[in-house]
Image (tube, grey):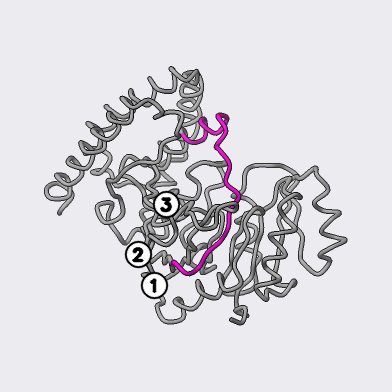
């Protein structure tokens, strides 16, 4: 396949010099011209800038002097792109030769597709899925039904999915701007779900063609991310959910939040939870403005966007067999409650 001439590529890199050469080599093998590529160097201290100047002089390099997470770099890549589409990549992702072309092709036939999301496979196990078929659970946790399952089980049919990871995404640039870009306050954690959820809120599709693959170097999430994941999850709910949805979810949240707090305390992260609550309170003065922006783009209701399904939880949090059984029972309760809401209060 020929590389699409209306696609730019933006790679966000922070001290990724060990992985970046393979990422750029994969793009070259896909036929991507070097002058279509922008690397946003986020305060790297590992010699990334010097290496790029020497090895990739035609590629455009933009440097951010402070590390505020990947979102400012992504937004820079989107807003400074000169083509209709922008393929966002993390610096530890490798594309297959036809990945970007397979994402671009359906957008020519269906103008409601504004995001193309490849199936993400493990870099060291390319036959095993890392992320596919994503969605947002109504308690605002990630749903990833194909995690660590064989790629062959995914099947050949494309899917309009509910959420996607931003390690690799093809975006319609104007649609990304229309929904407000990435929330740069999030640093990391829920920033990808928040952005892709707003794409869906605006009535657009996120298409996942299963033949389109990227390889991603997976690594366990560090405990320092808990602060952002807790804070950003609540901000996501308060910013994006309809008021009646939030009110209806109070009974389930009154179960979920104490359970989460107890688990975090047991793991030694109780203070992190309290710090995250303080961080959320600091964000609340801007909430009326945030909600107004979300309401301006809303086409679809929460009942059509959110789901109830098994939730992604760190393995060390559910290592105990009794805890795993409790999680399964709790998820059944969550599903029963959501189905009831959709048939009654949220049906109107």
Q: Position of residue 236 (x, y in %)?
A: 41, 43
How far is disc 2 from disc 1 in space, using C-alphas? Answer: 8 Å
**Badge 3: residue crowd in 10 Å (few <14, some 14–19, many ≥20):** some
Name the residue carrying label 2: 203
Residue 44, percent across and down?
76, 45
Instruction: Point out the tag, 3 or 2, that comes first from the N-terminus.
Output: 3
Dot label at residue 149: 3
Q: Residue at x 34, y 27 (%)?
A: 321
Quadrant of residue 260 within the rendered picture: top left
- From which residue to which does the magenta span run? 210-229
Tell me the element at label 2.
Answer: loop
Contact, mark 3 vs mark 2 (Cβ under 8 Å):
no
Dot 1, crowdedness within 10 Å: few (<14), some or many (≥20)?
Answer: few
Cα distance in 3D space between marks 3 and 2: 30 Å
Farthest residue, direction left: 344
Q: Is residue 321 above or below residue 123?
A: above
Between disc 2 and disc 1, whose residue precedes?
Answer: 1
Q: Is residue 261 left or right of residue 182?
A: left
Is 223 in front, or is 10?
Answer: 223
Residue 324 vertical placement versus 124 (above, below):
above
Relative to 290, say whether 279 is above or below: above
Kindly identify which residue carries mark 1.
112
Q: Secondary structure at mark 3?
A: loop
**x and y percent of residue 27 in the render?**
67, 68
Depth order, front residue of 331/77: 331
Give the numbered dot on residue 301.
Answer: none
Question: Going 39% across and 61% down the picture, which residue do you hit?
Answer: 154
Pointers 2 and 1 in contact (C-beta within 8 Å): yes
Q: Nearer the viewer, mark 1 or mark 3?
A: 3
- Residue drawn at x 57%, y 46% is 218
Residue 308 rendering spot, x and y as whole percentages? 27, 46
């Amino acid at each position: 396949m020929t590389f699409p001439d209306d696609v730019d590529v933006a790679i966000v890199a922070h001290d990724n010099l060990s992985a970046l050469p393979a990422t750029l080599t994969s793009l070259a093998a896909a036929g991507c011209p070097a002058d279509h590529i922008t690397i946003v160097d986020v305060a790297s201290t590992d010699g990334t800038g010097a290496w790029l100047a020497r090895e990739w002089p035609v590629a455009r390099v933009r440097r951010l002097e402070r590390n505020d997470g990947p979102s400012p770099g992504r937004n820079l890549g989107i807003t400074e792109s000169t083509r209709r589409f922008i393929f966002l990549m993390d610096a530890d992702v490798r594309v297959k030769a036809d990945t970007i072309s397979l994402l671009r092709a359906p957008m020519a036939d269906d103008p409601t597709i504004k995001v193309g999301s490849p199936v993400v496979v493990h870099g060291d196990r390319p036959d095993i899925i890392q992320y596919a078929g994503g969605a947002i659970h109504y308690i605002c946790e990630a749903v990833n039904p194909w995690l660590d399952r064989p790629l062959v089980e995914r099947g050949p049919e494309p899917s309009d999915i509910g959420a996607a990871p931003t390690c690799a995404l093809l975006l319609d640039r104007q649609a990304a701007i229309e929904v407000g870009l990435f929330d740069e306050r999030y640093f990391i954690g829920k920033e990808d779900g928040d952005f892709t959820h707003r794409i869906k809120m605006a009535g657009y599709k996120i298409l996942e063609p299963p033949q389109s693959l990227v390889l991603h170097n997976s690594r366990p999430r560090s405990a320092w991310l808990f602060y952002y994941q807790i804070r950003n999850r609540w901000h996501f709910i308060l910013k994006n959910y309809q008021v009646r949805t939030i009110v209806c979810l109070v009974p389930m949240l009154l179960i979920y939040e104490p359970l989460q707090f107890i688990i975090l305390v047991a793991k030694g992260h109780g203070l992190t939870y309290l710090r995250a609550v303080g961080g959320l309170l600091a964000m609340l003065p801007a909430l009326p403005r945030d909600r107004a922006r979300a309401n301006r783009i809303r086409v679809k209701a929460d009942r059509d966007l959110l789901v109830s399904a098994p939730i992604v939880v760190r393995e060390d949090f559910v290592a105990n067999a009794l805890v795993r059984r409790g999680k399964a029972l709790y998820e059944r309760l969550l599903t029963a409650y959501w189905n009831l809401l959709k048939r009654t209060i949220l049906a109107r």
